[in-house]
């Protein structure tokens, strides 16, 4: 024989209703209290006794303010009299001190102005020196560029370039004696072009060439090729007759000689 058991279902519906109703009542009470507080702040009520006390306090404060104002005016007047008396008694000494301080300040200012002018002078001198240095650097760069260009042109070429340095005791003039005549080169002149003198006119043209320069400031360098050895003695006599000092160096036949442009060097 089987027994059937029935489960009793438990419900919280009544408890939830109670909680919900209680929350609503509490919210309503809070709203009523809030409205009451707002109304009491907007329309404050004071008793007649409180108003009378406050008015008496205000009058007392006004009397104290008036008394303090009078005392303040009296203190100001006393301070003014004291200041005037102190100024009258100490004015000469104070004036002397102020004049001494002004004199010291003027001296300091003059010293500062002098220092500023000195600094300006130094800065100007430094700028000028810097400009000169930059100019020298540019000139040196230009000289280097020209020399590099000439060196590049001389590569692969069988020859020499005469670039004598300035500052010699005498300025050199080169006579290249070779096949058919004499070449005259003046490296330190602005125009360093070659001048060709054939052997047939050697005496007249060499004399004319040497007469255009001073034997006290110039010297002659004879570069003799093998093909010009037979004319070397005659050329030497012409140079000696004109009173020039000279020197002689041998030169290979196939070596080309060119003069540096003296106008490019400083």
Image (spheres, rainbow, N blue to C red):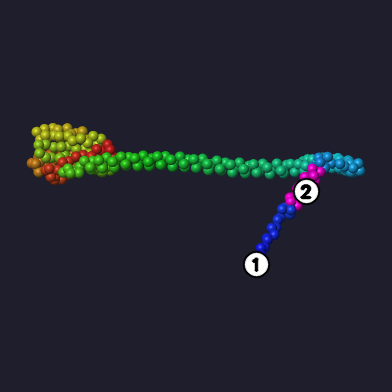
Magenta-tinted stretch: 17-36
Task: Assess whether residue 22 is covered by the magenta stretch.
Answer: yes
Q: Which residue is mark 1?
A: 1
Which of the two labelled residues, at mark 1 and mark 2, occupies the earlier sequence position? Answer: 1
Residue at left 69%, top 59%?
8
Is 222 left, or right, of 13 in this rendering? Answer: left
Q: How many neighbours does mark 1 have within 10 angstroms: few (below 14), some (14-19), or many (20 or more)?
A: few
Closer to us: 236 or 131: 131
Q: Quadrant of the N terminus?
A: bottom right
Residue 45: image x %, image y %? Answer: 86, 41
Residue at left 25%, top 35%?
190
Task: Assess whether residue 55 is covered by the magenta stretch.
Answer: no
Closer to us: 244 or 23: 23
Q: Quadrant of residue 233?
A: top left
Q: How many neighbours does mark 2 have within 10 angstroms: few (below 14), some (14-19), or many (20 or more)?
A: few
Q: Nearer the viewer, mark 1 or mark 2?
A: 1
Q: Which mark is residue 25?
A: 2
């Amino acid at each position: 024989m089987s027994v059937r058991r029935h489960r009793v279902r438990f419900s919280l519906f009544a408890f939830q209703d109670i909680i919900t109703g209680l929350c609503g009542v509490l919210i309503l009470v809070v709203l009523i209290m809030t409205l009451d507080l707002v109304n009491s702040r907007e329309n404050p009520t004071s008793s007649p006794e409180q108003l009378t006390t406050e008015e008496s306090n205000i009058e007392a404060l006004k009397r104290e303010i008036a008394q303090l104002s009078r005392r303040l005016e009296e203190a100001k007047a006393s301070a003014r009299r004291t200041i005037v008396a102190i100024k009258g008694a100490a004015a000469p000494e104070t004036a002397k001190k102020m004049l001494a301080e002004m004199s010291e300040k003027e001296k300091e200012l003059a010293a500062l102005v002098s220092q500023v002018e000195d600094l300006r002078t130094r800065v100007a001198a430094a700028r000028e020196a810097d400009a000169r240095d930059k100019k020298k650097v540019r000139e040196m760069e230009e000289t280097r560029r020209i020399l590099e260009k000439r060196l590049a042109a001389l590569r692969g070429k069988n020859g020499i370039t005469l670039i004598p340095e300035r500052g010699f005791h005498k300025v050199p003039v080169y006579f290249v004696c070779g096949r058919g005549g004499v070449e005259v080169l003046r490296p330190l002149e602005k125009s360093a072009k070659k001048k060709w003198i054939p052997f047939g006119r050697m005496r007249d043209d060499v004399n004319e060439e040497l007469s255009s320069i001073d034997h006290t400031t110039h010297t002659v360098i004879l570069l003799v090729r093998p093909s010009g050895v037979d004319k070397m003695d005659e050329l030497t006599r012409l140079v000696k007759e004109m009173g020039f000092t000279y020197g002689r160096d041998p030169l290979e036949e196939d070596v080309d000689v060119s003069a540096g442009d003296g106008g490019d060097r400083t």
